[in-house]
Image (cartoon, rainbow, N blue to C red):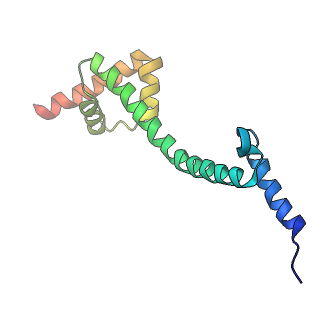
Amino acid sequence: MRVKRGNVLQKRHKKIIKYAKGFRGSKSRLFIAANQAIMQAWKNAYRDRRKRKRDFRSLWIVRINAACRMQGLTYGNFINGLMKANVALNRKMMAELAVNDKEAFSKLIEIAKEQLKTRVA
């Protein structure tokens, strides 16, 4: 006697089709196509949740570097000067200052330059 698992299989298929809602064409209607699309989508989502953090950090660094160079300092020297001055400020906040509060960022630049001068002399 064969096993008929109609409702179990149907529920599993229905669940996958539900997750694939919004996909185009057969990817939202046919189980096999939907299943493959869902697996790929979840793989990309998992990977990109981690990548987002790297992307934002590099964006902040680019913004800080641009603001530093306008004041005659490179990003590396700026960070080095702040570390020597024991200024504990993360890159997200520094980028925010560089974009929205140029006066405060100029103060940070001065602190970094001062530390670099005192170490050289």
Q: Position of residue 120 (x, y in %)?
A: 12, 32
Q: Position of residue 74 (x, y in %)?
A: 25, 27
In the picture, residue 116 is in which quadrant?
top left
70 sits to left or right of 7? left
Task: Kindly identify the residue that appears in the image at 43 percent across and 27 percent down.
Answer: 95
110 sits to left or right of 25? left
Q: Out of 120 and 50, give the one closest to the viewer.
A: 50
Q: Out of 121 and 13, give the one closest to the viewer.
A: 13
For residue 103, above or below residue 46: above
Task: Kindly identify the residue that appears in the image at 10 percent across and 31 percent down.
Answer: 121
Task: Kindly identify the residue that appears in the image at 43 percent across and 37 percent down.
Answer: 57
What is the tally of numbered marks visible in this picture?
0
In the picture, residue 21 is in which quadrant?
top right
Quarter holding the N terminus is: bottom right
Q: Position of residue 41 (x, y in %)?
A: 62, 47
Q: Position of residue 24 (x, y in %)?
A: 70, 38
Q: Residue at the far left: name it.
A: 121
